[in-house]
Image (tube, rainbow, N blue to C red):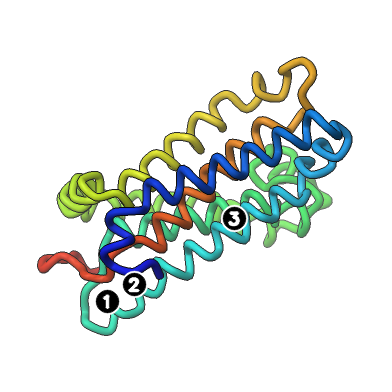
Amino acid sequence: MLPQRGAWFGAETLAAGLVLGAVAVLSLILVVNPPLAHWLTIEDGVVEWLQVSLDAAAVALIGRHLVRDNAEGERSPLDVLTVAALIGLIIGELDVDRWLFGTKVISTAFFFKAKYALPWRLLAALVVVGVPAAVGIYALRHVRTLWREGWSALGQPWGRVLAASAVILVLTQLFERPLGRVPGVPHFFLEETLELVASIGIVVAAAAHPPSRPKRSATL
């Protein structure tokens, strides 16, 4: 973890420096060796696995806070939802469902094709519907604490870095198709680069996350 004082003061600077470095390296590779840039940024390629590694590191860093706070009978709803979102992001990046079943479980083909066993389809439906519903209910239960913690985080460098990273991820998903159609750029290059930028910001924010919890914290 970053030192307490340095984490609060330098999270934005560190994130900006790492992001600029990563973007500069990938841009240079794109100019000098476009086939290599394409290979690095394909689905399940080097850049995507780097994203997964950074997101997993962020889960471990924030999860450490949750484990400690749980031992004290307290936990931050913001941290819980952040970890849940990151785990979902990692699962999506790894395409775990495609590895297991050969197709995305959110597709209608999976739920209605008889070649997939009914118990697996029911389990997938439970996961696809049940897990997001449980997360949503948890968020609603702790909405006041989330609001308070969210605004408190935005007043600190680590929180602003985390928020900016989340915005980048959302915008990247919204404009995924246009990003893949930019002439002269490998299909996944812009998407994967922006997702890498977000992952860098997330892990820096997680490392700079202060260990102290608010005095009043929600419990599960």
Q: CA distance from mark 3 to mark 2?
A: 19 Å
Is residue 152 toward the left or the right of residue 71 in the image? left
The three-letter code of the residue at mark 1 reads: Asp
Q: CA distance from mark 1 to mark 2?
A: 5 Å
The three-letter code of the residue at mark 3 reads: Ile
Count of marks placed on residues: 3
Q: Residue at x 43, y 68 (%)?
A: 61
Q: Would you say residue 131 is visible in this rendering?
A: no
Image quarter of the N terminus: bottom left
Residue 161 on image: x %, y %? 38, 45
Is residue 38 toward the left or the right of residue 51 in the image? right
As drawn, the label of residue 69 is 1
Determine which residue is flagged by label 2: 66
Circles 1 and 2, Cβ within 8 Å, touching? The answer is yes
Residue 202 on image: x %, y %? 46, 52
Determine which residue is flagged by label 3: 90
- The image quadrant that residue 134 belongs to is bottom left
In the rendered image of this protein, does residue 90 appear above or below residue 72? Answer: above
In the rendered image of this protein, does residue 69 appear above or below residue 161? Answer: below
Q: Secondary structure at mark 1?
A: helix
